Image (spheres, coloured by chain):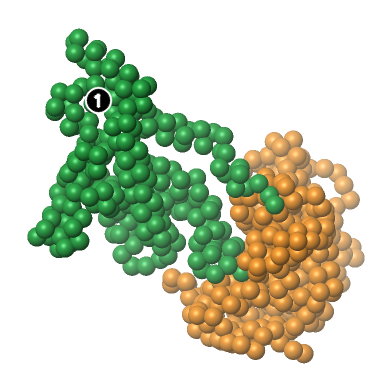
Chain colours: A green, B orange
Amino acid sequence: MVDILGGIVQAFQLIFAGDVTLYGIVCRTLLFSGVAVLLAALWGTPIAMVLALKHFRGKAIVKTFFNSLIGIPTVVLGLILYLVFSKSGPLGFLGLLYTPAAIILGEAILVTPILISITITAIEAVDPEVLLLAKTLGASDSQASMAVLKEALNGFLLGNIASFNRAIAELGVALLVGGNIVGLTDVLTTAISRYTQRGELDFAIALGILLLVIVFAINLLIIAARKVKIIFELWRSPQ
Amino acid sequence: MTLIAELKDVTKVLGATKVLDNVNLQINKGEILALLGPNGSGKTTLLKILAFLETPTFGEVKFQGGTVHAKNAELFRMRSTMVFQKATFFDASVYKNIAYGLKLRRLAENEIRGRVKEALMLVKLEGFERRSARKLSGGEQQRVAIARAIVLNTPLLLLDEPTANLDPKNVAIVEEVIAAINRGRGITIVLATHNMFQAEKLPQRVALINNGQIKEVGETSDVFGKLSRNLASFAAIDNTFKGIASDTGSGTTVVDVGNNVKVEVTTQQRGEISFFVSPQDIILSKSAIASSARNVFKGKIVAISDSGSLVKLTVDVGQPFVVQITKRSFVEMGLNLNAEVYLAFKASSVQVL
């Protein structure tokens, strides 16, 4: 008990002292997760738009596929990617295993189903006449799709934030394809696991607190954005 | 007369339904053409094909001499714009809504501002730029939707029931704008309506459409002047009835429209005739009132449709009559479905077709 209390006190000391190792891990985590979500949005948004706006055979199956992938255990995905990126794997020649790129790619793949599913729901909630409206005012097919996405901005942002939350809090992918290399590929979750195993509880607790703060802050941001609608009012302001 | 658009043997199949059936229609440059037909007759689909939002299943669409197909529809959409029956808006200000199409055309910001202002002036909504479009009243929304279309100055303007569900003040403004841009800018207008009297007032030509087929096309005066069998067959248009006219013996005429409903009219015609009673000309009351109205019927409210400040009621008196009252009257009278009500209208309000 004394150990735990001591650990908590030391953790706060580390946080307030601005420990370089500690904040290095935080920055790396934010960067990896941020880029991962950006990548997922880059390829996930067009897929979501096609799935929400176009009619084709097998659409329901594809949507169900992405929906079921939301719950994929991160270790399983981590293992699959490990096999793909390992030397004897199909993408082994890229030499990505145990690099930041592998974590970013892995997390991007992990959050893609969440991003796609939430974006589809948001787009489908938009009045279908908005697409026709944009077209009749002269928009090309892609411009009209963008107009619909703009209407679904609220849900689209929510999808991105939820994806970021998932990326930042996952362990399996970062551990298996990142290798938890100190100062290179260790992120909040993997570092917590390492410091706990080593018995360096002050570091583990400090990182745990920071992870919670980040996750709570993001959720507060969602609530604030919904209530105040700052972003949307800014976008709506005329002229 | 130069043609702006032409539909040749156009058929549109949606699922198992033939929404348009072998439609041939020519639209002259600079005219106002009304598509008159009951709900579900194919008017909206026809307009969407002319707006290049839908492609026909079979047949050919020509616009300003060129043939339109799925691949070049995007280009043609720049030259034809449609105002939908249900005013739809981007979740943005009135200004952004109206400016959207101009921005797509890459106009300079200055010019956009000027044209938005001018369009708002035309629909009598000056100073509405900063208002949120979705928070406007029904009438204002419809006027903004029209401003958003006319600001583009496309050679062809398509209006789907532009005055349905509007109060008389907004109807007058919208009709004035339609006439003004047709006269002043020479814009060709195709107007879908199920309101016979709007079709008679604004357009130079009328096309009667029913069950996806064009039944008759002609000059407005010709179509409405002669007793058109097609027009009379549009029983689906509210308050249009067909029956046998006979002498009452006291100088007036009574038309038996079946199911024990006999309507007094002022015509001297005998035999089978068709007539129309405007929903605005019918007085609705909860008890029988003594008045000069020659036609009084007791019935039950069978349908209620709310359209902003007005409420449309269908009253079954043996035949369905549509009555239009203000929402305030509706609330104050405490009306509801299946309520027993009385309808009254003058013999002189009955318009024989």
- Quarter of the image for the C terminus of chain B: give it: bottom right
Q: Position of residue B179 (x, y in %)?
A: 82, 69
Q: Quadrant of residue B124?
A: bottom right
Name the residue: 37% across, 32% down. A214
Q: Relative to residue B250, is residue A215 drawn left or right?
A: left
Name the residue: 24% across, 17% down. A7
Image: A180 above or below B307 = above
Q: Position of residue A2 (x, y in %)?
A: 20, 9
Name the residue: 82% across, 52% down. B126
* Residue holding disc 1: A203
Q: Nearer the viewer, residue B172 or B74?
A: B74
Q: Nearer the viewer, residue A196 or A59?
A: A196
**Residue that lies at the very extreme toward the top in this rendered image:** A2
Residue type, label 1: Phe
Q: Secondary structure at mark 1?
A: helix
Q: Chain of mark 1?
A: A
Q: Quadrant of residue B3?
A: bottom right
Q: Position of residue B183 (x, y in %)?
A: 84, 74
Q: Relative to residue B14, is residue B8 drawn left or right?
A: right
**Residue that lies at the very extreme toward the left in this rendered image:** A88
Residue A210 seen:
yes
Q: Relative to residue A141, is residue B286 drawn left or right?
A: right
Name the residue: 76% across, 64% down. B111
Q: Quadrant of residue A55?
A: bottom left
Residue B32 seen:
no
Q: Nearer the viewer, residue A23 or A72?
A: A23
